[in-house]
Amino acid sequence: MNNLVKGALCALMAVSFSSCHIYQKYELPTDTPVAADFKKAMEMRADSTQLPYLGWEKVFTDPKLQDLIRLAIANNKDLENARLNIDIAAAQLKGAKLSYLPSLAFTPNGGSASYGGSHMNWSYTLPLAASWEIDVFGKILNRKRGAEMAKEQMEDYRQAVQSQIVCGVASTYYTIVLLNQQLDLTKRTSEIWKEQVESMELLKNAGYTNEAGVVQSRANYYNIMSTIPDMENSIHELQNTLSLLLNTYPQTWEVTNSLDFDLPEEIVNGIPMSYLAVRPDVRASERALAQAYYATNSARAAFYPSLTISAQGGFTNLLGSIITNPGKWFIQLAGQLTAPIFSRGQNIATLEASKAQQAQAMNNFEYSVLNASAEVSDALVKYRKNHEKREYVLLQIDQLEKSVAITQELLTLDRNTTYLEVLTAQSSLLNAQLSSLNCWHNKVAALISLYQAVGGGK
């Protein structure tokens, strides 16, 4: 029997020379410009202090925000599900690795028989059976490698989910900061305009203006007061959104009053392709391509025979047609070679489908690289342009503050100056101040998007 098994193995190894490509490990194809650029980027060693490698604590330095992010990472259900997906993939990988080992089964049995009133003869068998599939053509190997890629893909997804949660908390947090600033500005402006109403009433009594001016100033004051409930409602809704991200009951979270939020200047000067090589969704897309590659190899391996060696041994009192008591030990060895014949058509169809799915995975991977590059570019441009815009808006605010002071002085000295000019100047100043806050928030949002676009450090 041993010679038979060795002969079968030699024959199978000879055939395997024609299918050695099914043993090859996955390598990213470089027959397209995008894939070639990405492979070069993967070979580059980026500085660990660069943005994709920075932990979120080094980017989001606000202590209050850091506490909220830690709470979200600990409690968020989406992230917990991502962690459980890793456990599932790890279990599947463990099963694929154990496929290399023989399977064992213990199946004891016994019985008795009586014929024509003869004495009952009891028989029993206590066998231990072992079966071992020899992976001659890489069927188990490719399944194991595919499972390894699936586990790594789940780890990439977990990192992507964590990055989304971190950036989602930061985005909500800074939107609340923005609305708080807008609310504070509006309340301060409403106090000024309330005083303006009182001043207009005094000017009317002194004959410097008429009732129309007083009515306009009072209407303008009520108009700005009407915007305050909307802002307070938006803040309340965002507080609830933040609570949901933290997986807790709605409550009010304390936020900073500071508008300081910047990243090192060298980070926003450009993002090399090597940054995209560590982005979780891009990595996950490449893992999917690797899984498709191993699935195609498995489909190719299905065309070749499979070899199974089995052994059975144990203790029995049934030997042939004679029942002996006491029993004796026995052992059996067998080798089985199974080659597909009539299933070839199904194997061909499976292989064609696997090749098509591999091509789809390649297309999805290239799109993920291009999409990531576009998102990084958009975030960089948005950051720069809002920075430039805010610089001009701050200059505008400086001029409008002077304009308000001048028109208010003219209103008290020049009878030809109307309250409409004061109202116009004050409205323009408020709009510019709100625009400055919006530019700040857009700049912060761009930096958060940039951090997420390059993968978000752990």
Image (tube, helix red, strand yellow):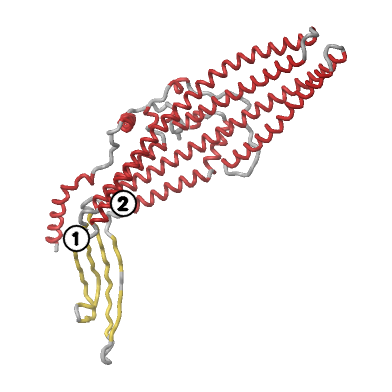
Residue 290 rendering spot, x and y as whole percentages: 32, 42
Secondary structure beneath label 1: strand
Q: Looking at this view, is 384 or 61 the one in front?
A: 384
Q: Which residue is the extreme one toward the right?
A: 205
Quadrant containing the C terminus is top left
Residue 25 is left or right of residue 281, and the answer is left
- When the figure is inspected, residue 68 is found, relative to residue 404, above or below; the finding is below
Disc count in the image? 2
In the picture, measured across the screen, residue 263 lies left or right of residue 124, that is right
**Local SS, label 2:** helix
| Foreground pick, 102 / 451 | 451
Give the numbered dot on residue 337. 1
Q: Residue at x 73, y 14 (%)?
A: 421
At label 2, the amino acid type is Lys
Classify residue 321 as left or right of residue 33: left
**Residue 88 rendering spot, x and y as whole percentages:** 41, 50
Camera-near label (2 vs 1) is 1
Residue 7: image location, x then y, percent:
12, 58
Answer above or below: position of 226 versus 362: above
* Circle 2 residues within 10 Å: few <14, some 14–19, many ≥20: some
Task: Give the position of the N terminus as an image quadrant.
Answer: bottom left
Residue 35 picture quarter = top left
Label 1, residues with CA under 10 Å away: few <14, some 14-19, many ≥20: few
Residue designated by label 2: 97
Taking the spot 45% from the left edge, 31% from the top edge, the residue there is 453
Q: Residue at x 19, y 65 (%)?
A: 333
Image quadrant in which you'd find residue 173: top right
